[in-house]
Amino acid sequence: MSTKPLAPRLIDPTILLPATKAAFVKLDPRQLVRNPVIFVTEVVAAMVTLFFVRDLVSAGGSPLFSGQIAAWLWFTVLFATFAEAVAEGRGKAQADFLRRTKSELTAHRLLSPEGRETKEIAASMLKVGDVVLVEAGELIPGDGEVVEGVASVNESAITGESAPVIREAGGDRSAVTGGTQVLSDWIKVRITTAPGSTFVDRMIALIEGAQRQKTPNEIALSILLSGLTLIFLIAVVTLWGLAGYSATVLSVTVLAALLVTLIPTTIGGLLSAIGIAGMDRLVRFNVIATSGRAVEAAGDVDTLLLDKTGTITFGNRMASDFLPVPGVTETELADAALLASLADETPEGRSIVALATGEFGRPVPAAQMDAVVPFAAETRLSGVDHAGRRLRKGAVDAVLKFAGLSDDKVVAEFRQAVDRIARTGGTPLAVADGPRLLGVIHLKDIVKPGIKERFAALRSMGIRTVMVTGDNPITAAAIASEAGVDDFLAEATPEDKLAYIRKEQAGGRLIAMCGDGTNDAPALAQADVGVAMQTGTQAAREAANMVDLDSSPTKLIEIVEIGKQLLMTRGSLTTFSIANDVAKYFAIIPALFVATYPALGALNVMGLASPQSAILSAVIFNALIIVALIPLALKGVTYRPVGAAALLRRNLLVYGLGGLVLPFLGIKLIDVIVSTLVLV
Amino acid sequence: MLLPVAALVAIIFVAMGLPQTFNASVEATTLEGAKQTIALGPVASQEAIKQLGTNGGGFFNTNAAHPFENPTALSNYLNIFAMLSLSTALLYTFGQLVGNRRQGWAFIAVTFAFLIMGVGVVYWAEAAGNPILTALGLDPALGNMEGKEVRFGQAMTALYAVVTTGLSDGGVNGMHGSFTGLGGLVPMFLIQLGEVLPGGVGSGLYGMVVFAVLAVFVAGLMVGRTPELLGKKIESREMKYAMFAVLVLPAAILGFTAVSAVLPSAVASVGTPGPHGLSEILYAFTSAAGNNGSAFGGLTGNTPWYNTTLGVAMLLGRFAYAVPVLAIAGSIAAKTRVPASKGTFPTDTPLFVGLLIGIILILGGLQFFPALALGPIIEHFAMLSGQTF
């Protein structure tokens, strides 16, 4: 059962209606000044509106023309604010769902941490350091740390995972999140985050306008866009003088139209929507980022530090092969191992059954067992008695002892097989039928299926993967080569991790890692992108700049892709926006001067109906393209892990060439409509 | 390097017939028996250093159109070769210095793609000639010979004009103002791009680097990483300086041109009425801001207004541009180099060469298209429709 909200549909009235209202509120110049391109558009729109009013009251003007230009300039601004509002609305819908879980909570604050006497206060009144008592059935009032007691907690509101988890004082499982429910027993929780700055609140703040700060790349891009705006301002203002030389008087309205179509309104209008949508996508992957900067850094990551257990391998050892001694067939050994493991419910036992029935295709015997010998710490073997056979499997020396064989009586092939397995980091399990030694089962850490392909994909993206493990170097090397990671860190201590990250960073690389333990915290803080597991300790979650609510270590790969997608969407729309200008020149410049120089009509390659309809069409296209691109800004440009050169080729073709060609078609089409309707 | 090469080139020039003497002039008796004073001087050595140093200032007023500066087709080629040699070598040096020779070659490829395109357009426009004159009975096969030396013709004049404006040389072997509309547009546009093709000796290469910074920033994002050039991250500070640098040329060129175009006293200096007059003003400020030195003859530039404003344009075009570029260099030098990987945006491939050409063309074109449309572009279309000014 998942309680995760689905990705909101693009056309969702519950988002679009408030967004329309918000779009008007955002017209406030004090707010809009943060976005220079759109701010300039607003100023110009206001100016043209004045000229429209003048045209209305004085004779000689063309109020129909200036009125329509003014209207479409206002639409341009509105579409831009609308794009931002829609992105915020979608993000808020996501955040509201999380927030709902934590509103209207009451807390039982302990008068003294040792006692059981409590006072009921609103959760929002809690302070850092307060200790609260949470009993079965109650919601935990805020993020904190268990200081006393053990309880099972339902964290599905945050993680979408319905299975309860154990939270207890001390160790790595002491962190609890506000809004989650205690199912059994009781715990005392020391509040570690003031209400209003919990992860959920922080994320809501990142999505909603108030605290949203521009990320470094967003700032750099804004500078580029402002610079381009200035350049076009120069080009348009000087055009007035140049036209004066040619005895052409250009009206403010047409110059304003030219300016707004030239400045990069498309990317300027969609820039913040792209950023918000990136955060939103992350939330939908159940990752909460505590800064927009981290999302951007994710796109730049050069090296991923991945824990072996749980990320690269399943974590428990599984049977991978049967190695019989001479005189015994593989089938015979598989059958014996299968029988011996049928009653074994440990993961190893089940993996032996799976291997024998799966890869070796052995049928499951239906026969009744005479006796089941469970695994015990003293005997270190398990098995069954069946139809007079005494089948046992277990640690090599234990099985040899059971079979009554001394070391020197064992065949060399058996010895070699055991050594080989141990050398590659596996665990050998011997199998015997009474006194007869049958062979060895190779148990090993199984690399997750598909992980090698993902690492290959990462490599083609230019990202190195480094496996971190506590195993000895031999075992680590074996698994590293099987999983296809680029490097590994064996017998790694937290200090080793930190040192490795520092070393890589000194070489100019950006590092991403995930971790959950308190001892991971320094490395998480040092990494450029640190993802803490929701199940991890408070320390780890504080040190990281992202928290994965699903606690899935492979999430790092998705996070990197989301970061890349965010940057790609920005770049593609910027390219598109600049490329659009070429067509707009061809629409507007001949329209401005064809009266003075009829020969310039040759530049009217689109064959636009009249100068006025040409200018109006360019302005309308410029406004509508913002709306048309909102879905792309929200969804993001598709990312494929194919390497930079191939990506560039594809995106240049689509957004560069497309950006050159599309407006020629679009403006022509609008011109046909405008001139058919005789709007000007 | 410059001195020995200049000495060598000077000797070759002497062998080609350029005078090299300390005599100021020589007296000659013409066929009619009249006395003629022919100016002389150390022309060969001056010519060598003028081209190698991409200065462009001629020994004679008509510059390399003068038979003593540029007597033959062969000396014409040596002129062009001398202009291009050191400045192109500097692109290669750039690649060498940044530890990636392919980067240097990429810039060289961009440069020559532009120069070849430019020569193509100018030659085509000039060789096609003027349909108005054709209608008057002139042989169209001759093309437009106005302002050109018969010994060079359209092809060699086109080559010289494009190279001298592609970089900041400014020497001429024909009169750019007498070119056809499109033929005159190309040299003007090349200067407006910042004379980055391939840039002059001493300054110019940085313009190409600024374009590369911009190209990398816009397109680099498209590969899903924050942009890098030569392993250095391009961030807001570099962007700020780059945009400042890019603003200088349109501000100086378009700003002064627009004011001059409406100032009656400044318009009075124009030699030809109509769009060509606007081209003259535009070319003057373009050439000054670019420190090129070539001119669209016809404009009387020796007035207080033009002397002052052209001087300021020159100052802005060189120093207001160089300061932010130096700031970029300082900022980039302080950064750690990011090792390249498959995810890194490649800046030394044919794809990047194409991209850089596109960015230079679009960014440059977008800035100056309106002004050019009112000058040379109108001239071109007016000529086609039989209208002269």
Image (spheres, coloured by chain):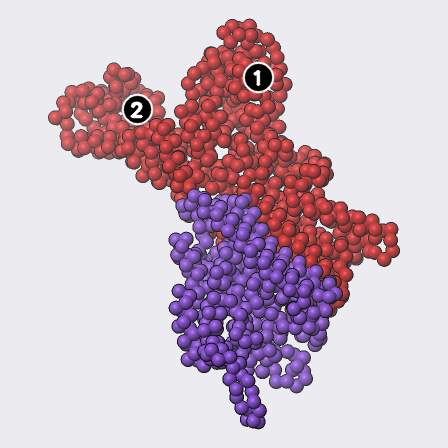
Chain colours: A red, B purple
Q: The N terminus of chain B appears in which quarter of the rendering?
A: bottom left
Decide if residue A207 is in sight here: no
10 Å neighbourhood of mark 1: few (<14), some, or many (≥20)? some
Above or below residue A493? Residue A105 is above
Location of residue A637 in the rendering, given as x and y in whole percent from the top left corner? 55, 45
Per the image, the residue denoted by label 1 is A127
- What mark, if any, has residue A592 been given in the picture? none
Residue drawn 42% across the image and 73% down it: B9
Location of residue B330 in the rendering, given as x and y in whole percent from the top left corner? 48, 47
Above or below residue A633? Residue B42 is below
Residue drawn 52% across the image and 86% down it: B27
- Identify which residue, B46 or B132, lies in the foreground: B46
- What mark, if any, has residue A341 been given in the picture? 2
Above or below residue A581? Residue A374 is above
Decide if residue B65 is in sight here: yes
- Dot 2 falls on a residue whose secondary structure is helix
Left or right relative to B79: residue A102: right
* First along the sequence among labels 1 and 2: 1
Query: Disc 2 residue type?
Result: Ser
Residue drawn 52% across the image and 19% down it: A192
Chain under callout 2: A
Query: Disc 1 residue type?
Result: Lys
Q: The C terminus of chain B appears in which quarter of the rendering?
A: bottom right
**Which image quadrant is residue A484 in?**
top left
- Dot 1 falls on a residue whose secondary structure is loop
Determine whether label 1 and label 2 are within 8 Å by CB.
no
